[in-house]
Amino acid sequence: MAIMGKRFTAKLGDYTATIHMRPYEPRIDAGFWHGGSESPPKEVVHRCEVRYRGKVVPLGRGVYCDLAEVNRIYFYKNRRGEVVLTIEGGDADDGYNAYLVFSKGELVRRRVENGEFPKNFYEETRYIRIPYID
């Protein structure tokens, strides 16, 4: 059984989010982590669950599997009317802000910025849902 760490929650309107942390495990977690690039992090994100109107929003593990040392999470609405889950993590040189952007209950973008130089060092992913017919 895995030992669980901290848990963070946030809510705004129809959206709720919960992030579950767990201790860093060197046998399976070796590699690059936002919030742990200078030394191995103490805790890493184990699971991120976002709900829209009570239903789970599907999130691939790639959305959160490289985030560590979370300090706090919160939602806000941007100028486009999208809902943004902000995840603040790390400290000083290892600090980062991750933004998960949702529109109508779907994840549309993810951006992770370096806490010290956010305009110079960041990564961004766009998510496109392609409809299909059974």
Image (cartoon, grey):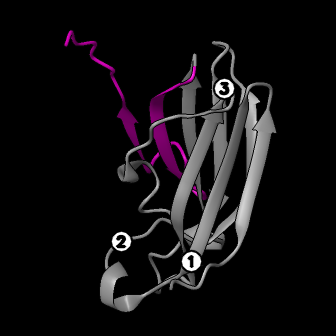
Q: Of the two numbered discs 1 and 2 on the same chain, state the one appearing first in sequence.
A: 1
In magenta segment, residue 121:
yes
Q: Of the two numbered discs 2 and 3 on the same chain, state the one appearing first in sequence.
A: 2
On residue 83, the disc is 3
Give the image location of residue 66, x and y in percent.
42, 62
On residue 106, the disc is none
Give the image location of residue 32, x and y in percent.
36, 71
Whether residue 72 is visible, yes or no, is no
Q: Is residue 73 above or below residue 76?
A: below
Q: Which kind of residue does numbered mark 2 sit on?
A: Phe
- Magenta segment, which residues? 105-134
Which residue corresponds to mark 1? 22
Q: Which kind of residue does numbered mark 3 sit on?
A: Val
Q: Is residue 40 above or below residue 16?
A: below
User: Is 22 in front, or is 73?
Assistant: 22
On residue 32, the disc is 2
Give me the C-alpha separation between circle 2 and circle 3: 28 Å
